[in-house]
Amino acid sequence: MKTVILAGGFGTRISEESHLKPKPMIEIGGRPILWHIMKIYSQYGFNDFIVCLGYKGYCIKEYFAHYFLHESDITFDFRMSNQQYVHNHHAEPWKVTLVDTGVNTLTGGRVKRIQNYIGNEAFMLTYGDGVANVDIGKLVEFHKAHGKLATLTSVQPSGRFGALELAEENDVKGFQEKPQGDGGWINGGFFVLKPEIFDYIEGDETIFEHGPMEKLVKNKQLVAYKHSGFWQPMDTMRDKDKLEELWNNDQAPWKLW
């Protein structure tokens, strides 16, 4: 089963770094968040990726074109006609297809543009800016069991600020660090989709989360897989710093490998 990753947006809310590179290439622990997402899927044996490129897509192409340089020790011998020797060679078991889906194409349009690479089979889809400790194997099993066209992973994001625990007379009983938000479930990405989903997408101007998903709901073809574990998007520098801190302290819940 192939995994499609949306990696073409402008990342305007994290412009401190996205003016230099696409958001999926912003690094956590010295590696792009895109790499972290792919490692999550790879842990469950899903190693065939299609990455939807857009804004500064060449940065992602260059990263994978020089992947050995990033992951290996190399000797350049300029005395011997500029020969190079790769040491401690390490490569992921990945097949990565990079597709230019347009700079201004919206999310649904990007999905539509990779239809020819999917064929007549179910596939997974997620955003290129969020990590989680979702059990991908159980997610796929859940999707196959209900038999409908689409599954999304629903999550409950934590509140942005810590909360006070108050007693009577407004005495403070304690502090609660980053509690769950209002208890509502939101779309956390990590979709599983049947190929019929392409019939729900009109073209480049389609926002996947609006028209197609609304039609799926109307037709009773969208099911939520509830994930109560860790989930964190990287929308802002605050989010990036949080993920970086977790990684540097060996407390990254998404590191399943």
Image: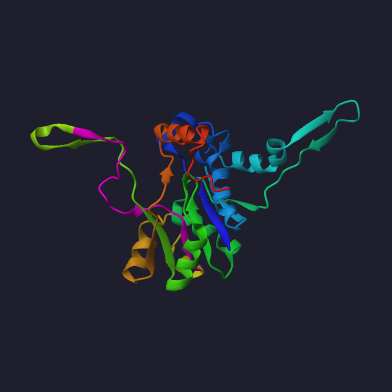
The x, y position of residue 225, in whole percent, is 40, 61
State the residue at coordinates (31%, 54%).
185
In the image, residue 189 above or below residue 253: below
Q: What is the image's colouring? A: rainbow
The x, y position of residue 246, in whole percent, is 47, 35
State the residue at coordinates (66%, 52%).
94
Q: Is residue 119 left or right of residue 253?
A: right
Closer to the camera, 67 or 6?
67
Q: Quadrant of residue 85?
A: top right
In the image, residue 112 above or below residue 130: below
Closer to the camera, 169 or 127?
169
Find out whether residue 179 is within the magenta segment: yes
Closer to the camera, 166 or 80?
166
Would residue 98 be visible to someone looking at this image?
A: yes
The x, y position of residue 248, in whole percent, is 52, 32
State the residue at coordinates (31%, 36%).
177
| Residue furthest top as drawn | 79
